[in-house]
Image (cartoon, grey):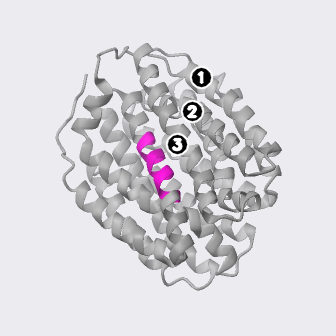
Amino acid sequence: MGHSVNNYIRCATFFQNSGLGMIFVFMPIIAKEATTSIFEIGIIIASFSFAQILSELYFGRISDRYGQRLLFIRAGFVACAITFGLHYLAEDSTTLLIARVGAGITYGIMTPAMLAYAYEAGREKKKVASVVSFHALGWLAGIAAAGITNDTKLIFLVAACMFVAGFAVSTRLPDTRTIQERAPGTTKGIISKNRYLFLALLLRHIGAASVWTILPLMIIEHLGGELYHISIVYVSNTLTAFVVMTLMASRIHIPHITKFKIGIGMTVFVFVGLLFVTEWWQAMPFMALVGGTWAFLYIGGNFHLMENNPKSTSTGIFSSTISIATVIGPIISGSIAFVYGYSTVLYFAIAIIIVAFIVSLWAPYKKTITR
């Protein structure tokens, strides 16, 4: 029974992240079709994450408070199918902005609950990493599907179908209940006791999100790439993340917080390397490296939190921290690129991620139980 449940979770996680991955990578290109302002492109990209922040914090806490996961997973799939599909009707920057906000809210409904459900369903915790690895495999499939579709309007309808498929799979999952976490001040306590982890994550992802805003544009405008070349470059990222996450299930036996710190520190070399890229295909090894670093920090950070804190609340904060960075990063990137050009964004990312690694070294190894 446990084995089949894990397989259903893998499938649901796959479709959830396929739907998101299809849209995320091409959003700078899609936004540029709606507006020529690089600053407005940054705002449109950031709007999704801004809405996701509030949604994940709220629904992640509610999921723990009532001890329910599946309700939020299913509601999220249905709502995402609607909001992502509605992107197809967006004809200008205003309607695209509204669509992105709606998508951020609906995607945030299920993200913390899905990760907590996967963790709680795994009887052997070492196998949970292999379940979570389908997060990366979903992105890989979504990015590849977007490249094959090669249509910046049609991909929204395909993404909506991914979420419908995810909902169908979720109907096969058992509706398990967990201990209700109703203690007041839980969110504040988790943030306080894990402040260095969250701050390092925030700074790292501000740098990364800044680069992801301009990289698709760089590939098209300066590196001689086409739309499908963006897919190829990003597939090298997600494929590596999938492989490394899968290996963590059985081969990589180091403390989770150490994995997190390795993931933060190694990211610096990605953006140093991108400074020397002159053709689109040369970005692939560096994107593969960032896939590996993401696997380390995502698995390491989330598992460290779930072992020592209320699961859905702590993973909701983790995901919201990424979303906060994905709000700040594109705005900074758009501003820097508007004034100084694309390459300056890479220098900014390198500097802020070095600071992030230094901060991560202060994150404690000791248990930080917050009840």
Q: Amino acid at mark 2?
A: Ile
Q: Which mark is residue 50?
A: 3
Q: Amino acid at mark 3?
A: Phe
Query: Where is the N terminus found, in terms of image quarters?
Result: top right
Q: Which mark is residue 266?
A: none
User: In the rendered structure, which disc, 3 or 2, sits on the residue that comes first in sequence?
Assistant: 2
Label 1 with label 2: CB-CB less than 8 Å: yes
Q: Which residue is mark 1?
A: 173
Q: Is residue 122 above or below residue 150?
A: above
Q: Amino acid at mark 1?
A: Leu
How far apart are labels 3 and 1 at the CA level?
A: 30 Å
Single out the mark in the foreground, 3 or 1: 3
Query: Where is the C terminus found, in terms of image quarters?
Result: top left
How far apart are labels 1 and 2 at the CA level?
A: 8 Å
How far apart are labels 3 and 2 at the CA level?
A: 27 Å
User: In the rendered structure, which disc, 1 or 2, sits on the residue that comes first in sequence?
Assistant: 2
User: In the rendered structure, which disc, 3 or 1, sits on the residue that comes first in sequence?
Assistant: 3
| In the image: residue 182, left or right of residue 212 | left
Label 3 with label 1: CB-CB less than 8 Å: no
Label 3 with label 2: CB-CB less than 8 Å: no
> Which x, y percent locates residue 167?
68, 28
Q: Residue at x 46, y 61 (%)?
A: 208
Specify few, some or many for label 2: CA neighbours under 10 Å numbering under 14, 14-19, or 20 or more.
many
User: In this rendering, does residue 291 appear at all?
Assistant: no
> Which x, y percent locates residue 203?
36, 56
Q: Residue at x 25, y 43 (%)?
A: 195
**Magenta residues (range):** 319-330
Q: Is residue 96 above or below residue 238?
A: above
